[in-house]
Image (cartoon, rainbow, N blue to C red):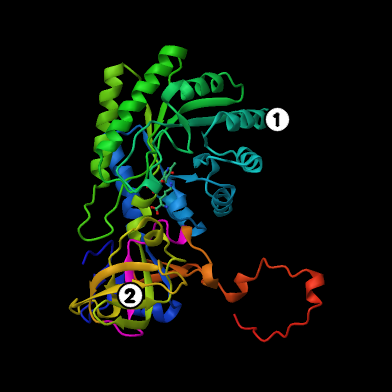
């Protein structure tokens, strides 16, 4: 069993995180419960800063908040010296509400609305990550009206197919993101953008996908990017000063998955960028990284309570838990695999193969297929580690399930950072038109 961050098993066989017993956490906050290990978040953030300081000091790390975002996290990210990548007015709003410095915010998105663009220009964000020319023209117009000069980076697609699930590949030519480097599309976009009065094009961006273990994909991407940057210089004389390599570094979700490691990633991309700069005699660009999963993924653990235990003779045993695809869609969406720990009896021998099922009305709502576990009973607690990234962020209220509570643990303290949704929350945006109110219904539920 792989333990992450500050996880440890006590003498009595209970899983502890951040110096707190998961049994105590469940007693206080209930389940499903997403537990974030603050030490682990900070450790990963520091690993990025340290590794790039070592190999390529002229760099910036910007946390991709789509992996998980709330106001408490903004404080940690800011304190660790990282910037913040947002992809919508909603993420931007959360960051601004928390007081995250706007100049350290990078705004992505393949279909930013005019309202989102205005909001970001007015807030004075650090970089617009341009997806296409239409957007650049609009930003230029708004900036002109508001008499602002906007720093922007153009997202390009390099035609690289990273070794990862096809749903999370983004660098291939057939992609909805960015402008392709092929057939001079990106070059033409740059020719127009650099003539815009209110936009300063500081660099180019590339993101080839997520959960990537094979670091050579990043190397090949840097090859393509330098060819492209050199071509832009040849045709326009323009030097792109920033090279944003996106995110994508994979993390080990299960015992047998390797950990590519932040240090190794930083070393490889730094060396490659130096090598290519030298080869093309191109000024060394600032490297920007946008990690999401590799900062927050291993810091999150979801705790569930076992309910129904169902054995289908000679076929399978199901342990049904009180959450599922609503708090973690990744197994259903990508076939993602996870490990599990019987948190209240973590030392018990793993002697039977079970599948851990969610409680949604979907046969596909299985969190883990066929995992060896100790014999579990109703009321036991199951911990699924590595659920910090793209779980809560992708959660839903399907089947009327309420989003879980989220706690931040550190050094023996637990702080609630997101309340569990209430039944009342499920209807807070509901409106019953007056003409329907005439139909007399008898209201009996009130708790929630
Ligand atoms: C543009 C961009 N940057 C950064 C990220 C973060 O990726 P990851 O969480 O794999 O590090 C993503 C998500 O894939 C992305 O689309
Ligand atoms: N949500 C995906 C990754 C997409 C990353 C965002 N571009 C996952 O869970 O793996």
Q: Is residue 144 visible?
A: yes
- The earlier-in-sequence mark between 1 and 2 is 1
Q: Which type of secondary structure does the marked residue at label 2 adopt?
A: strand
Q: Which residues are magenta?
A: 376-393
Beta carbon of the mark 1 residue lies under 8 A of ligand 1: no
Q: Is mark 2 within 8 Å of ligand 2?
A: no
| Closer to us: 324 or 286 | 324
In the image, residue 406 above or below residue 236: below
Q: Residue at x 26, y 29 (%)?
A: 272
State how many labels appear: 2
The numbered mark at residue 145 is: 1
Q: Residue at x 22, y 64 (%)?
A: 2
Mark 1 surroundings within 10 Å by alpha-carbon count, few (fewer than 14), some (14 through 19), many (20 or more): few
* Circle 2 residues within 10 Å: few <14, some 14–19, many ≥20: many
Q: How far is the residue under mark 1 from the one under mark 2? A: 55 Å
> Magenta: predominant secondary structure element?
loop
**Closer to the eye: label 1 or 2:** 2
For label 2, the residue is 382
Residue 21 appears in the picture as rendered: no
Residue 83 position (above or below residue 58):
below
Residue 206, image quadrant: top left
Query: Contact (CB < 8 A) between labels 1 and 2?
Result: no
Q: Where does residue 398 sit, x and y in percent of width and height?
A: 52, 67
Picture coordinates of residue 83, whole percent (x, y) = 45, 43
Asked which secondary structure carries label 1, the reply is helix
């Amino acid at each position: 069993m792989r333990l992450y961050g500050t996880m440890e098993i006590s003498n009595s066989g209970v899983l502890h995180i951040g110096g707190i017993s998961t049994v105590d956490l469940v007693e206080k906050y209930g389940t499903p419960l997403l537990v974030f290990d603050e030490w682990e978040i900070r450790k990963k953030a520091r690993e990025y800063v340290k590794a790039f300081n070592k190999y390529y000091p002229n760099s910036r790390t910007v946390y991709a908040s789509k992996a998980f975002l709330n106001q408490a996290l903004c404080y940690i990210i800011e304190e660790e010296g990282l910037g913040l990548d947002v992809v919508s007015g909603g993420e931007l709003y959360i960051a601004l509400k928390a007081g995250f410095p706007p100049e350290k915010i990078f705004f992505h998105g393949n279909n930013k609305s005019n309202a989102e663009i205005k909001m970001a220009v007015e807030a004075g964000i650090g970089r617009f990550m341009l997806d296409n020319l239409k957007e650049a023209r609009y930003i230029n117009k708004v900036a002109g009206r508001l008499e602002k000069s906007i720093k922007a980076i153009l997202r390009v697609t390099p035609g690289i197919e990273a070794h990862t699930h096809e749903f999370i590949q983004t660098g291939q030519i057939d992609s909805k993101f960015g402008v392709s480097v092929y057939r001079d599309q990106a070059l033409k976009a740059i020719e127009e953008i650099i003539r815009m009065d209110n936009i300063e094009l500081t660099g180019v961006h590339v993101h080839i996908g997520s959960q990537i273990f094979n670091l050579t994909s990043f190397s090949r991407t840097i090859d393509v990017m330098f060819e492209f940057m050199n071509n832009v210089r040849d045709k326009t004389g323009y030097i792109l000063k920033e090279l944003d390599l996106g995110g994508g570094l994979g993390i080990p979700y299960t015992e047998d998955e390797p950990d590519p490691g932040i240090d190794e990633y930083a070393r490889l991309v730094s060396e490659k960028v130096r090598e290519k700069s030298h080869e093309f005699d191109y000024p060394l660009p600032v490297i920007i990284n946008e990690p999401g999963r590799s900062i927050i993924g291993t810091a999150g653990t979801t705790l569930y309570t076992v309910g129904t235990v169902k054995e289908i003779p000679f076929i399978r045993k199901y342990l049904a838990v009180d959450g599922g695809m609503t708090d973690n869609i990744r197994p259903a969406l990508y076939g993602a695999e996870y490990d599990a720990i019987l948190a209240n009896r973590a030392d018990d021998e793993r002697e039977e193969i079970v599948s851990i099922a969610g409680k949604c009305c979907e046969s596909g709502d299985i969190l883990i297929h066929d995992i060896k576990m100790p014999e579990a009973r109703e009321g036991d607690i199951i911990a699924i580690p590595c659920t910090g990234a793209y779980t809560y962020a992708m959660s839903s209220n399907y089947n009327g399930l309420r989003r879980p509570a989220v706690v931040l643990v550190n050094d023996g303290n637990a702080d609630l950072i997101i309340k569990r949704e209430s039944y009342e929350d499920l209807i807070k945006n509901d409106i019953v038109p007056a003409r329907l109110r005439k139909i007399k219904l008898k209201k009996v539920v009130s708790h929630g």
